[in-house]
Image: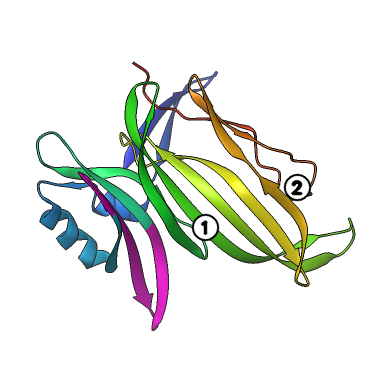
Amino acid sequence: MLVVLALARSADALVVIDEPPIVEACPRGKTWNDVNVCLTRQGAVTVERVLPKAKLVRLVQTENKRPIDLGIYLYLQRDDGSWSVGGMFSGPSYSVIDLVPQTIDNHAGFRISVGQLVRMHTSIDGGSQAPVILMTQRTLFCSGDHYACADTTTHCDVLYRGKTVWTFRGTLAFEKGLVRTVGDRSKGGRVCAPTERVFLGWPQK
């Protein structure tokens, strides 16, 4: 469990933040086998991507004969040979597209691309809610120093009755300490207009 001390105006305040269950249960291991044994106690493990000194795994539990996806977890091999969590993602109806090394501000980390397809309801014409399909491609920037990853959306489409009503396509540009998603947001509507600038929070050298 991660404990963070926050200073309030009137008095010192203790804020307790729970880490994700899998991160708390299996944060590290002396060997990959140690990590794998720990993960298999939590659910079924699937290795999604493998790079030198990096493994991206998906964990699925079964509850009442129904599979429950607990997310993907990036484990990295450290200089002493041990493995520890360096990133994660969880969400509905996703698939892993890619895992690649990414260096930002001279810090070597990783970029994870995830595709999602979600059925939801939203207002198309400013009136009543309508059922739509939201398709996105999200890019996660994981520094490797923490399980949390910065997140931006580069592709987005909203389909209503088989037709695309909102859309966005973006390209990535980097500035000191942040990533920009550059693109025309005029056709993004209520849903497909991602934040342009996302703070990375990566260590800078």
- Is residue 38 rendered to the left or right of residue 177? left
Q: Residue furthest bottom?
A: 65
163 left or right of 195? right
| Quadrant where the image shows the N terminus | top left
Quadrant in which residue 160 is drawn: bottom right
Q: Position of residue 55 (x, y in %)?
A: 26, 51
Q: Amino acid at mark 1?
A: Gly
Q: Is residue 36 magenta?
A: no
Q: Are the residues flagged by discs 2 and 1 in contact, CB closer than 8 Å?
A: no
The residue where tag 2 is placed is 188
**Residue 19 in sight here:** no
Magenta span of residues: 50-71
| Residue placed most toward the observer, 52 or 10 | 52
Q: Quadrant of residue 111?
A: top left
Identified at 20% across, 44% down, the residue is 53
Q: Is residue 55 magenta?
A: yes
Q: Which corner quadrant of the image does residue 59 belong to?
A: bottom left
Counting from the top left corner in percent of width and height, residue 115 is at 52, 57
- In space, the residues marked 2 and 1 are separated at their CA atoms by 18 Å
**Looking at the image, which is closer to me, 71 or 165?**
165
Query: Where is mark 1, residue-wise?
Result: 115
Q: Tell me if mark 2 has few (under 14), some (14-19) or many (20+) residues whose alpha carbon lies within 10 angstroms of its own.
A: some
